[in-house]
Image (cartoon, rainbow, N blue to C red):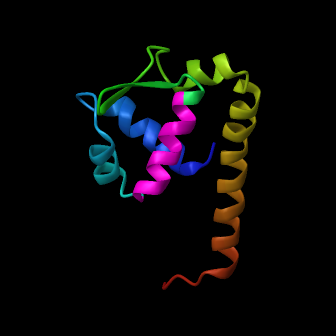
Amino acid sequence: MADPAALVYEAIESARHSPTSADTIRSTGISRPAVESALSEMTALGMIHRAGRQMAHHSYGNLGQLAIRLGVMHDVWDQISQHPKQRAAWHAYLDRFVWTPP
C-alpha cells in the first residue's frame, strides 16, 4: 500500500466516530480517487469494513498488530531502525553545508 492508504487508515483509526468517505477526504486532504482507491484496497485486505456510507477499522488494535497479522513486522522494524541513521546523516549534512550566523 502507498502513503495515501496509510493516511486514510490513520484518519479512520483516529476518528471519534466512523467517518464517511467525504469526512476522510476532508480530514486527510487527499483527492477523492486516491481515498476511494485506498478504501477499496483496505476493504479487500480486510483492514476496514463499510457499514452503509461509514467505515471503521477492524478491531486488530493498531497498525503494529496489523503489521504482525500481514506478516510485515520485520519490514516495519527495518524502517524504524533506519530513521535514527537517516536523521544523523541529515544533521551531519546540515552541520557541514548550512551556514548559521554567529
- Quick one: quadrant of the N terminus? top right
Specify the quadrant of the image occupied by residue 87.
bottom right
Front residue of 66 and 46: 46
Q: Does the magenta segment cover residue 35?
A: yes
Measuring from the top left, give residue 97's x and y in whole percent: 67, 81
Judged left or right of residue 25, residue 91 is right
Residue 99 in picture, x, y percent from top left: 58, 84
Q: Is residue 54 above or below residue 3?
A: above
The span picked out in magenta is 31-43
Query: Is residue 81 depicted above or below 22 in this figure?
Result: above
Q: Position of residue 63 (x, y in %)?
A: 53, 27
Residue plotted at (58% across, 21% down): 66
Which residue sits furthest front? 52
Tell me: 39 left or right of 73.
left
Residue 96: horizontal and vertical position, in percent? 70, 76
Say whether residue 32 is magenta.
Answer: yes
Give 13 or 84, whichever is nearer the viewer. Answer: 13
Q: Main secondary structure of the magenta part?
A: helix
Q: At x 67% / y 46%, what residue is drawn?
A: 84
